[in-house]
Image: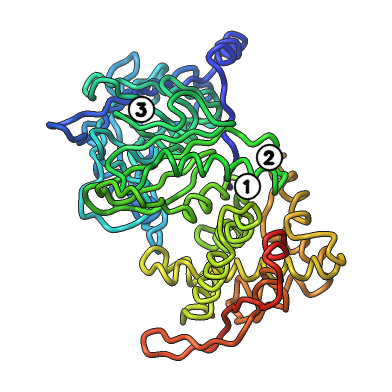
């Protein structure tokens, strides 16, 4: 589940630590290392202190993380020391997870430790030519380096609270370089266990910035490398959309600070776009600047929307029906309301949703089977995105019809979002109860059939609003004919009605 990271000022952290007898602190310093003009590794030195209890000391790093292979294998010269000297470690790996989903290597201390404990290692960048996947791996570009904490960090896994502090050592980087994380710039602090540092993007080097200093209503962006479009222009567009999303959905008010990271890589894998708490990374191939080019704004909108949709408690992969399905639905609908996308683009987008469901043979696969396929086939992996989007469009149309147009899906979801934000468990049982309250008996079984069991369904009339109509359509995949539906523009409906829906 995506929850906003709680940020603490240096003064607040100092006050909190002064009032605690044995406050747990995890301090980490990141030093990018270069050979020539290119970063080849990040050297990490971290100190864990103030730990109470007798839990055995244990470290962890992913062997594979969301399709990115070999992360733990690229950890070099790992050493752990405490006041008694060096601590010997024993390494074991979890069983591999199907579909490219995360599993971890664990380094366990062979003796009890005393604190503070110092952890040193060097994490190599993900090599060029690796398998394509989300941009979690650390990669060089534009004289700097970027990636997710899950792509290079070795984290103490036996501690569950405290405060973590990150600082950068940029002595081996070009003059004027900056280090930025999702939760702050330069020396930054975050409340929670060290594992929270894995759920952050990191970027260091001679970054471009929007705005040049500070934030635009809580929004900021940073980028590395040669972009075919002007990142500052698309960052300004994203800032305006971020403000509109908050106004339209009325959830998370005021919207929390948000960072967009963009990296432009000279070698594959490129990676696409992926959201983490309060931030996302856009990863593309580098290219010469084209004055007429526009950035991938649908991707920008989709990843920012994750800040509001969040997730649901469910097994890896299975949960994407909600986190990605609801996000895909709202990414089509909300920017259109604000005039950030044209009605022509909107019609094309809902047709892509229809094709991504009805035009894929895996449309009748169970959610569990799709999760096991994982990152091996992008069309299959995206079936829950599109199946979920049609499910939410259908749910929205029925909520509107039942309320005489007074309520929409977003209105119905507000109490669920608020309860989730307050820490209440949000899982499939909570969802079943929700749809029964909204639609009546049988809606819970309908959810299981359509979303979890893969029963092919046809949404009700009115999905995606009055300006498009569901029409039969035949698709072909690998020589197989698939009967389904698409959308056509409804004649006679004013553009203003379509936009406002």
- Closest to the camera, between mark 3 and mark 2, is 2
- In the rendered image, residue 145, in percent from the top left (x then y), is placed at 29, 36
- Image quadrant holding the C terminus, namely bottom right
The label shown at residue 252 is 2
Report the front residue among 180 and 6.
180
Q: CA distance from mark 3 to mark 2?
A: 46 Å
- In the rendered image, residue 113, in percent from the top left (x then y), is placed at 39, 22
Q: Is residue 35 left or right of residue 11?
A: left
Q: CA distance from mark 1 to mark 3?
A: 45 Å
Residue with the mark numbered 3: 111
- Dividing the picture into quadrants, the one containing residue 500 is bottom right
Q: Is residue 118 left or right of residue 457?
A: left
Please, which residue is most extreme toward the top here? 18
Q: Secondary structure at mark 3?
A: loop
Above/below status of 312 relative to 122? below
Report the front residue among 5 and 328.
328
- Closest to the camera, between mark 1 and mark 3, is 1
Q: Which residue: 72% across, 68% down?
A: 395
The label shown at residue 214 is none
Q: Is residue 94 visible?
A: no
Q: Answer whether labels 1 and 2 touch (C-beta < 8 Å).
A: yes
Residue with the mark numbered 1: 308
Closer to the N terminus: mark 3 or mark 2?
A: 3
Q: Is residue 340 visible?
A: yes
- Dividing the picture into quadrants, the one containing residue 451 is bottom right
Q: Answer whether labels 3 and 2 touch (C-beta < 8 Å).
A: no
Q: Which residue: 72% across, 74% down?
A: 462
């Amino acid at each position: 589940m995506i929850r906003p990271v709680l940020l603490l000022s240096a003064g607040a952290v100092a006050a909190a630590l002064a009032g605690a007898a044995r406050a747990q602190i995890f301090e980490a310093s990141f030093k990018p290392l270069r050979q020539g003009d290119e970063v080849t590794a990040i050297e990490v030195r971290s100190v864990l202190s103030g730990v109470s209890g007798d839990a055995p000391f244990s470290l962890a790093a992913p062997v594979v993380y969301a399709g990115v292979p070999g992360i733990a294998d690229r950890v070099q010269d790992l050493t752990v020391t405490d006041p008694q000297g060096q601590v010997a470690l024993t390494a074991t790996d979890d069983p591999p997870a199907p579909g490219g989903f995360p599993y971890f290597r664990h380094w366990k201390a062979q003796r009890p430790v005393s604190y503070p404990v110092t952890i040193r290692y060097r994490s190599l960048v993900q090599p060029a030519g690796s398998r394509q996947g989300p941009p979690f791996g650390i990669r060089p570009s534009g004289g700097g380096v970027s990636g997710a904490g899950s792509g290079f960090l070795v984290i103490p896994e036996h501690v569950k609270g405290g405060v973590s502090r990150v600082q950068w050592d940029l002595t081996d980087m070009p003059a004027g370089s900056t280090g930025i994380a999702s939760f702050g710039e330069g020396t930054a602090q975050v409340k929670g266990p060290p594992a929270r540092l894995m759920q952050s993007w990191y970027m260091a080097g001679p970054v471009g910035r929007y705005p040049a200093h500070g934030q635009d209503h809580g929004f900021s962006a940073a980028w590395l490398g040669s972009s075919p479009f002007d990142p500052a222009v698309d960052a300004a567009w994203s800032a305006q959309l971020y403000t509109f999303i908050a106004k339209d959905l009325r959830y998370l008010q005021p919207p929390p600070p948000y960072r967009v990271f963009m990296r432009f890589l000279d070698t594959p894998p490129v990676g696409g776009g992926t959201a983490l708490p309060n931030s996302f990374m856009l990863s593309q191939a580098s290219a010469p600047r084209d004055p007429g080019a526009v950035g991938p704004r649908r991707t920008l909108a989709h990843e920012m929307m994750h800040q509001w949709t969040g997730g649901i408690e469910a097994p890896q992969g299975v949960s994407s029906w909600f986190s990605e399905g609801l996000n895909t639905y709202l990414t089509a609908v909300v920017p259109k309301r604000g005039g950030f996308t044209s009605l022509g683009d909107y019609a094309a987008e809902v047709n892509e949703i229809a094709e991504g469901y009805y035009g894929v043979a895996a449309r009748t696969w169970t959610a569990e089977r799709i999760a096991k396929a994982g990152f091996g086939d992008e069309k299959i992996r995206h079936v829950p995105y599109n199946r979920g989007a049609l499910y939410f469009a259908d749910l929205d149309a029925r909520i509107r019809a039942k309320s005489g147009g007074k309520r929409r899906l977003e209105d119905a979801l507000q109490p669920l979002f608020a309860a989730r934000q307050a820490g209440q468990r949000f899982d499939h049982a909570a969802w079943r109860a929700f749809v029964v309250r909204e639609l009546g008996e049988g809606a819970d079984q309908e959810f299981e059939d359509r979303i979890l069991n893969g029963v092919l369904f046809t949404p009700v009339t009115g999905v995606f609003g009055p300006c498009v109509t569901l029409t039969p359509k035949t698709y072909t995949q690998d020589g197989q004919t698939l009967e389904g539906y698409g959308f056509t523009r409804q004649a006679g409906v004013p553009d203003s009605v379509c936009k406002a829906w």
